Image (cartoon, rainbow, N blue to C red):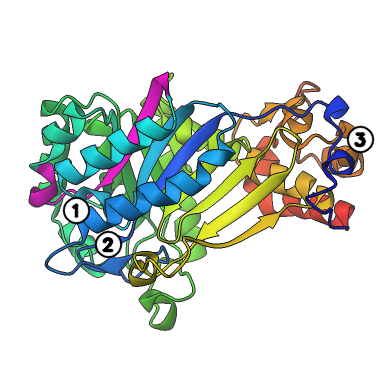
Amino acid sequence: MSLIASDLSTQRPLENGFQLPPLALYVHIPWCIRKCPYCDFNSHAATPELPEAEYVTAVLADLDADVVHAHGRPLTSIFFGGGTPSLFSAQALQALLAGIEQRIAFSPDIEITLEANPGTFEQEKFAAYRAMGINRLSIGIQSFADTKLEALGRVHSGTEAIAAIAMARKAGFDNFNLDLMHGLPDQSPAEALVDLQTAIDLAPTHLSWYQLTMEPNTVFWSKPPLLPEDDVLWDIQEAGQALLAQHGYKQYEVSAYARADQVALHNVNYWSFGDFIGIGAGAHGKVSDPSGRIQRTWKTRQPADYLNPDTPFLAGSNTLPAADLPFEFLMNALRLTDGVALGLFSQRTGLPLSALQTGLEQAQQRGLLSADPQRLAASAQGQLFLNDLLQIFLEADS
């Protein structure tokens, strides 16, 4: 049953432990050099002249409307995603970052991540990004093999990818992620492991290593390439995870691996059902208020519409009914390899643990949940069959 926003006292009783979670900020910059055939994100091919000043003004006005969701909390992380945010000049990003800090305070140890392409044009700006306070890069490598990059529609080469990492270090970035795909068209296990070993040898603090999937509304969906068979994909996954572990990269989420104490704070907040304000064209957010009401928000997608002063930034919002919260929480938290502390469920949702009881019993009986009584975490078997584990809770709530 949906709960109306005006009757907050019946939605999630505060005596059940609700606490405002940490607050992050996601900033979407929707332009890229060229739309990749596998990409289903809100990204658009850039025109020769990007409307940087207009977009910065719009995004800060968007934030002005959303500051109400901060409730006195500082930002623990900011993530500039896209598109390709590194297409923006250092001056534009500096103005944007300064404007954000004027509106919401930064925590002393804030993590500020910028997604960047490895192209030479972007590399030239790395030092300026670091000087303005961006302290983490996420570099979209995808592969070091030129034939695979061409098949993926990427605009950089393997050589440029390696040079970008050297440039990031020279610019002062000691914390950066590499995005790497496997299961690429006609990719053998040996080729996938060469890619992964190359990335490991470059010693990033964090690796996002994930399988290429065919998503609706993409070129690959309508014209799918020839991908490796399922048994080959499984061989790649097993061998790759072993290689990462051997070199000190601990898996902490389905596709995220990090050196000790180098997990992405923004990612962990997201997967532990923390709050994040989403600003920029097509950005999504999840925000709570002190009464325990939780909303999901989404912004106008098309850049031209977003920049049109007659179009509202907010395209829609939805207050999550209490009945949906157990599944919403677990759909996030169970992606974390170590799960979350048991008490976090009530802190984030305001619901008693008894709301999970039926699902917990069934999942434990099937061996899909960890036996640790203090944590909500998938077992090793549950991590392999995460969809089956989540289905148990979805059916228990219905």
Whether residue 48 is visible to the viewer of this picture, yes or no, is yes
> Real-space Cα distance between discs 2 and 1?
8 Å
Residue at far top of view: 108
Disc number placed over residue 261 in the picture, else none: none
In this view, the residue in front, 331 or 284, is: 284
Corner quadrant of residue 137? top left
The stretch of residues the image draws in magenta is 106-123
- Residue labelled with disc 3: 354
On screen, residue 155 versus residue 302, left or right, reads: left
Q: Position of residue 58 (x, y in %)?
A: 34, 55
Residue 151: say if magenta: no
Q: Main secondary structure of the magenta part?
A: strand
Q: Position of residue 186 (x, y in %)?
A: 32, 67
> Disc 2 residue type?
Trp
Q: Quick one: label 3, few (<14), some, or many (20+) residues within 10 Å?
A: few
Q: Work out whether 164 lies above or below 299.
A: above
Whether residue 237 is visible to the viewer of this picture, yes or no, is no
On screen, residue 338 versus residue 246, left or right, reads: right
- Residue labelled with disc 2: 31
On screen, residue 51 versus residue 389, left or right, reads: left
Identified at 23% across, 32% down, the residue is 201
Q: Position of residue 165 (x, y in %)?
A: 17, 37
> Disc 3 residue type?
Ser
In this view, the residue in front, 371 or 275, is: 275
- Residue labelled with disc 1: 87
Identified at 84% across, 51% down, the residue is 323
Q: Position of residue 174 (x, y in %)?
A: 24, 23
Identified at 85% across, 43% down, the residue is 11
Q: Quadrant of the C terminus?
A: bottom right
Q: Work out whether 114 lies above or below 190.
A: above
Q: Secondary structure at mark 3?
A: helix
> Real-space Cα distance between discs 3 and 2?
46 Å
